[in-house]
Amino acid sequence: MQVKLLRVLDGTPYYRLGGVRKVSVDVRIVAATNQNLEEMVRTGRFRSDLYHRLCQIQLRIPPLRERIEDIVPIATHFLNQYNSELSFTNEALRALRSFAWPGNIRELRNVITKAAILARTESITAADLALEGQASFGASSFGASFDTGGGLPVAVGVKSNGKGPVDGPNLEGIERSTIMRVLAETNGHQQRAANLLGISRRTLSRKLKLYGMESRQSFVS
């Protein structure tokens, strides 16, 4: 694949899939990676000619842990996107700055979104962020921590295959109420709700059908 891409970037005409005439490209390439390409070139895993073809102008964006001064402004931006009436306590701001953020921007956005959804007051505390021992979570699953009333935190999840909630005490009811709460926050907009929950639009639709909610309430796709 690297050889084929290099040929196209060097201006070699090529056939489109199913095409009968050769075409040439006139494009500007903007490429991004989280790999050390110089090391990959040295070890033979990346072609040096392709690397030098792509690397005319290089911009390095350090991870969040190397630019602590950016964490709070970015977190505030995400919080304002969800609810501009919410704010961080000083304790929460210190927790944001001290966390390593192995998942970088995506992890920060997910943490802020979860805290905004579960916040019981207008001030986001360090406890709301739940950063102690937290692992990164991606777009294929939604994780949250709830109090069941007995002081026992229960992990709640929507499986990425959309086949139901993860095992646990009364998780179906908690999952159902969480989905309804997020839908209420987004005025019934399913795509926005799915984005906030970290699941696909199709998974959310299956959940609504599973809980018999789609027929009783009007939602925006």
Image (cartoon, rainbow, N blue to C red):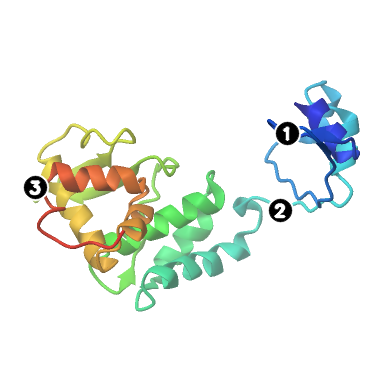
Mark closest to the chain's N terminus, 1 or 3: 1
What's the residue type where badge 2 is placed? Answer: Ile
Q: Secondary structure at mark 1?
A: loop
What's the residue type where badge 3 is placed? Answer: Gly
Residue under circle 2? 61
The residue shown at (25%, 64%) is: 188
Residue under circle 1? 19
Q: Is residue 97 left or right of residue 166?
A: right
Q: Residues within 10 Å of mark 3 (few under 14, many from 20)?
A: few
83 is higher (above) or lower (below) than 163: below
Dividing the image into 4 quarters, which one contains the C terminus?
bottom left
- Which label is found at residue 49? none
3D distance between C-alphas at marks 1 and 3: 66 Å
**Residue 43 at least partly seen:** yes
**Residue 127 at least partly seen:** no
188 is higher (above) or lower (below) than 44: below
